[in-house]
Image: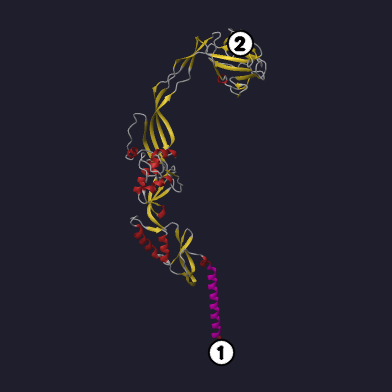
Amino acid sequence: MKSKNNNTLIIIVCGVLAVACTLLFSAIRYRYLAVNSDVKLEESIVPQEITDQTFFGHKVAKLYDKGKLIGVFNDRSILKNALNNIYVSEYQTDYPNSSLALSPSVYFTEESSYFYYENKDEEIIEYLRKNKLFALEVNRVEFSNNVVVYVKNMEDFETAKDQYLLNYVDKESLDLIQVNQLPPELTTYGERIVGIQVAEQYTVTRAYAPIEDIRNTVQEILYFFSYGYGTNLETYTTEEFDTVEWVASKYGLTAQQLITLNADVLKSPTQLLTTGTKLNVTFFQSPINVIVTKERIAKEAVYAGNTIYRANPEVREGINNIVVEEKDGSKNVYYSEVYINGLLDKQEVTKEEITLEPVQEVVEYGTMIIPGVGTGSFRYPVANPHISCHWGCYNNAAWGFHSGVDIQNNGNRYGSVLAADRGTIEEVGYNSINGYYVYINHNNGYRTYYGHMASMCYFPVGTNVEKGEVIGQIGMTGAATGPHVHFVIYTGREKHDACRWLGC
């Protein structure tokens, strides 16, 4: 009886333990599920439902594009076949002998999960196909300055490169240099190309590139050579009478450069432009550097030295005679020049040849002094001069036009009046406008006039006076509001502004 009771007790204890274990495992399971419940919150581009949970967890493959979850991939093994099928159906014709991979922005992560997701592999693949999130195996061209470009075929690359080089050299020279020949030697003025190269070396490998990064045509590769990546283009819409050369020069381009930038619409510098044509006029911002070496022969002037002056005592002072006329010479200058991207970087003169010697000017100047004959050079008619009224400083009904220069002596208001140059006293007198005045004839075509003097000139008519000799005193006779000399220079009977000679 006792044994039977013991068995019953054991059965009860085992049952209690089983229930306890079940409850404990459930608690642990839900604890882990709670810890990982944040997984449910990660939204995916391709919607997926959670179909089941597991206590022990398992590995899942998550596919992302630029950090955004596309979806959980159920069977990665089908992806390779899917990529191959898409390549064959959509890309093989345009990109033969290639293969398809995921775009570099698309990547898998593998992590543990306590959830099972519904199978959306086909929808995820369709999303990849629709958004072209693929990379194609193409030619990867890397320059020594780390610039990379992906091209569909190297023939187009070489064609585009040669076309880009035509911005800096003519086609004939380029064709010769590419077969290790040079244009003919220069026999007259001009230039010839003796070398052209891209400064950056490049290597070509096969690599996967995003479809949008592949340069498929000559024009697309030419754009890369011209602007690299990310350049904002400036455009110009043609107007009536525009020419290729005029549009090019307006934006600092050559005609050939404008043609290269617009190869789809421009073919020749003489091409007639249709009004309303939109042209790319953006100057080059190339990721590469084109180095061109030129030889040039130029005709340049050889200038004579400073004029040689010789005194001649037999010629009157103020008279100059050109004995030998100045003539510029010339020379042929031979240059070696290096241009980088069309801009002169280095220049060296390799040889010079004088083709015509210059002739230095020789001038004889007279030193013979003749009384009464002026030098033709004038001085101020007062010491410490100050201009109080310039030529034309007033023009009114009461006073008329001021056809002279009023000059004061800053240090002595009533100081001396001085002869502006050698000459002969021609006329002295008085009138109500200019008061006491005097004319001096300089016997060389010039006459000078001095007005508002304090009294009559010190010398009678016919007297020869020297330059700077005192001929009277400053006054304010006649219609004057203050002491000054009204000074005029004449040629014949024509009045002139004396400041032209005095420099005032």
- Amino acid on which disc 2 is placed: Val
**Residue 352 falls in image quadrant:** top left
Q: Is residue 452 above or below residue 280?
A: above
N-terminal-most mark, 2 or 1 = 1
Q: Is residue 453 above or below residue 37?
A: above
In three-dimensional space, the C-alpha distance between marks 2 and 1, rounded to whole angstroms, equals 168 Å
State left or right for residue 149 relative to residue 371.
left
Name the residue at 59% across, 12% down: 439
**Which quadrant of the figure contains the C terminus?**
top right
- Residue 285 image position (x, y, % from top left): 44, 43
- Badge 1: residue crowd in 10 Å (few <14, some 14–19, many ≥20): few
454 lies left or right of 208: right
The one nearer the camera, 86 or 177, is 86
Kindly identify which residue carries mark 2.
428
Q: Position of residue 170 (x, y in %)?
A: 36, 38
- The residue under label 1 is 5
Against 38, is 416 above or below?
A: above
Image quadrant in which you'd find residue 99: bottom left
Task: Tell me if residue 186 can be seen.
Answer: yes
Image: magenta residue range: 10-37
**Relative side of 267 to 483, left or right:** left
Q: Quadrant of the N terminus?
A: bottom right
User: Which residue shows up at 59% across the image and 15% down it?
Assistant: 449
Q: Which mark is residue 159?
A: none
Q: Secondary structure at mark 1?
A: helix
The residue positioned farthest toward the front in the image shown: 397
Q: Is residue 210 visible?
A: no
